[in-house]
Image: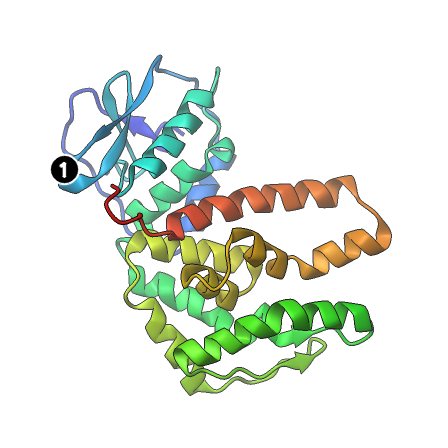
Amino acid sequence: MRDFLSYDPTETKPEFTEPVVDPVARARDHARADLPKRFYREVSVGPAEGGAWRVLLDGRPVRTPARRHLEVPRRDLAEAMAAEWAAQETIIDPRAMPHTRLANAVIDGVAVQPAAVAADALKYAGSDLLCYRATDTARLVDRQTRLWDPVLDWIEETYGARFLVAEGIVHVAQDPEAIAAVGRALEPLDPWRLAGLHSLTTLTGSLFIALALAGGRLDDDAAWAAATVDEAWNLELWGEDEEAVARLVARRREFDVASAFLREAPAGQP
C-alpha cells in the first residue's frame, strides 16, 4: 500500500509503471489495500515547474503510485488535496481523499491515454440516462421532462446532435453521426477536465449532464438535480432510507470533486 501515495526524500528518478486501462477504477482499487500509518507532521502546498502546484509533506513532494510527482494545474486543487492529507490522523485512508485519488488517476492514467478515457465516456452517449423515461408515473415523467429536455435541447443546439428519447428500458439506437459530434467535443479537453468529465459521466450515467456542466448550461446543483431525479422521487415516495441517503451523500461528494476538476481556472488565477 506504500505505493498508493508517497514522497521520496532523496528525489530519485521516478519508476514508471505500465499505463492503466481504467485510471479512476485503479485509483479506487488502492483503497482496498492495507492502510499505511501517517508518516508526516506538516502539510503545505507549494509551486512547481510550469505554473503547477504540489502538496508537500514535511516540505517534501508527494508522488503518485507510478512515482510521478503529484502536481495539479491549480492552487485550489492542491489546497483541497492538502486538506485531505492534513485530515488523516493515525492512518492514511484513500477513501477519505477523493481529490488526491482523482489527481493520481489523471497523472498516472488519463494523461497517458486520454483517447481511451474519452472513448469510454463517449460510450454513454449511446444509452444516456436522459434518453430513457419512466412509463408508469405521470408526475415522474413530468419531472424528467422538465429537467432533462432542456439539456438535450442544449446538446442539439451546441453540437448539432439530436438524440432520441424512449420510454422504459428497451434500448434505442442513436444516430452514429450524433454520437460522433458529441465525441468531437471531448477532443479539446485537457487531461484534468477530461478526468472530471469521465468521473461525472460514470457517477451520473449521463455524458450529456457532464457536458452541460462543462459548458456552463448547468451549475453543480442543477446538474445534481438532473442526475438524481429517480432517486429523489423514490425518497419522496417511500420516505428516507438511511442507506440510500448515505449512498447519495457519498455520490455527491465524488460529484463535487469531479466538478472541481472539470472547471477551468478563472482568468488571471493559477
Q: Nearer the viewer, residue 262 or 220?
A: 220
For the point 41% across and 30% down, which residue is it?
1
Label 1 SS: helix
Decide if residue 241 is in sight here. yes
Q: How many marks?
A: 1
Report the side of 17 relative to 13 (left or right).
right
Quadrant of image for the C terminus? top left
Q: Vertically, is 4 above or below 106?
A: above
What is the crowding at mark 1: few (fewer than 14 residues within 10 Å), some, or many (at least 20)?
few
Q: Residue 106 at x, y = what percent?
A: 33, 48
Report the side of 210 relative to 172 (left or right).
left
Residue at which label 1 appears: 49
Three-letter amino acid code of the residue under disc 1: Glu
The colour style of the image is rainbow
Residue with the most extreme front position: 268
Q: Residue 214 at x, y = what percent?
A: 41, 60
Report the side of 65 relative to 9 (left or right).
right
**Residue 223 picture quarter:** bottom right
Decide if residue 69 is in sight here. no
Residue with the most extreme right position: 238
For the point 37% across and 65% down, which residue is it?
118
Q: Residue 186 at x, y = what percent?
A: 35, 67
Report the side of 47 relative to 159 (left or right).
left
Q: Residue 78 at x, y = what percent?
A: 32, 34
Q: Vertically, is 47 above or below 22?
A: above
For the point 48% across and 16% down, which residue is it?
89
